[in-house]
């Protein structure tokens, strides 16, 4: 993926100094070198898919994940999302359970596992680390992705108003220091993983709380 093919990043480049400095290009080079030695997810054209589908000025909600799914065919460039037709991983199933309970009184429509529909409404589904080696979760944390994505979160906090940040689990909650204490809604809950979902994610009400905030501050809401 060359610089000429990254035109969709212009809005992010103008608002996030680390893009202007070219850190994303250095990271792409590092990932390209890794691909010569190991299978890397997602596909190169999907690494920045979350930023492509949700431009800086369109962001309304930020959901922070850790790194992409590391199984074949799962990672699509959006945190927690997998391509249509792929079985929903356990965390995504629990997300859908909470949406159904919180928004649809338990009678939810059939949900697509592809969360592009959320991204197109302004939900930035941002993994802190944008690539991973097959079968090795957390394997690309050493590359420096978090420097870039921390910069994205900080830029949104500083330059936008009235956003909702959903931080699920201790790792995502460690990003709270990047977010202004006023002017945004920060929602915290345990991770939707089966290991922790029953300790407070299920029943957290984040989706209805986000919509109430968005209606009050922006005059619209997300169709979850």
Image (tube, helix red, strand yellow):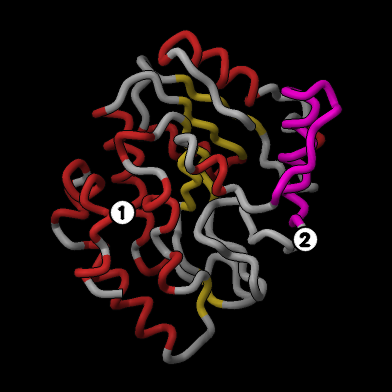
Residue 178 occupies quadrant: top left
Q: Give the residue number, with chain letter if any, for mark 2.
A: 87
Q: Nearer the viewer, mark 2 or mark 1?
A: 2
The residue depicted at 74 percent of the width and 43 percent of the height is 111
- Using a 10 Å C-alpha cutoff, classify the residue at mark 1 as few (fewer than 14 neighbours), some (14 to 19) or many (20 or more): many
* Image quadrant where one finds the N terminus: bottom left
The residue lying at 54 percent from left, 35 percent from top is 167
Could you classify mark 2 by the number of other residues whose Cα lies within 10 Å: few (under 14), some (14-19), or many (20 or more)? Answer: few
Say left or right for 142 vs 100. Answer: left
In the image, is residue 59 above or below residue 152? above
Residue 77 point in image, percent of width and height: 50, 59
Front-most of 83 and 15?
Answer: 83
Task: Out of 66 and 89, give the one closest to the viewer.
Answer: 89
Return the residue nearer the eye: 140 or 127: 127
Residue 23 colored in magenta in the image: no
Question: Residue, x 35% and y 85% (percent of image)?
Answer: 33
> Badge 1 is on which residue?
148
- Residue 71 location (% of width, % of height): 66, 72
Q: Would you say 18 lies left or right of 177 here?
A: left
Q: Is residue 92 above or below residue 143?
A: above
Sequence-first tag of 2 and 1: 2
Residue 9 left/right relative to 59 = left
Q: Residue at image x 56%, y 27%? A: 222
Residue 44 lies, in percent from the top left, at 42, 73
Label 1 secondary element = helix
Q: Position of residue 65 (x, y in %)?
A: 54, 48
Badge 2 marks a residue whose secondary structure is loop
């Amino acid at each position: 993926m060359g610089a000429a093919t990254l035109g969709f990043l212009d809005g992010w480049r103008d608002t996030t100094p680390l893009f202007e400095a070219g850190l994303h290009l250095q990271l792409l080079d590092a990932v390209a070198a890794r691909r010569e030695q190991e299978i890397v997810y997602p596909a190169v054209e999907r690494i920045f898919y979350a930023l492509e589908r949700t431009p800086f000025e369109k962001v309304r909600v930020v959901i922070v994940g850790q790194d992409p799914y590391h199984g074949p065919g799962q990672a699509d460039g959006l945190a927690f999302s997998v391509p249509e037709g792929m079985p929903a991983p356990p965390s995504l199933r629990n997300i859908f359970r909470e949406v159904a309970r919180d928004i649809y009184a338990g009678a939810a429509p059939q949900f697509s596992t592809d969360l592009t529909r959320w991204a197109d409404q302004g939900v930035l589904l941002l993994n802190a680390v944008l690539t991973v080696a097959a079968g090795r979760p957390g394997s690309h944390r050493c590359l420096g992705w978090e420097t870039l994505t921390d910069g994205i979160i900080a830029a949104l906090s500083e330059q936008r108003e009235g956003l909702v940040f959903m931080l699920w689990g201790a790792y995502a909650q460690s990003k709270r220091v990047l977010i202004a204490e006023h002017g945004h809604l920060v929602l915290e809950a345990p991770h939707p993983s089966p290991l922790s979902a029953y300790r407070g994610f299920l029943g957290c009400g984040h989706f209805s709380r986000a919509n109430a905030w968005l209606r009050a501050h922006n005059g619209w809401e997300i169709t979850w």
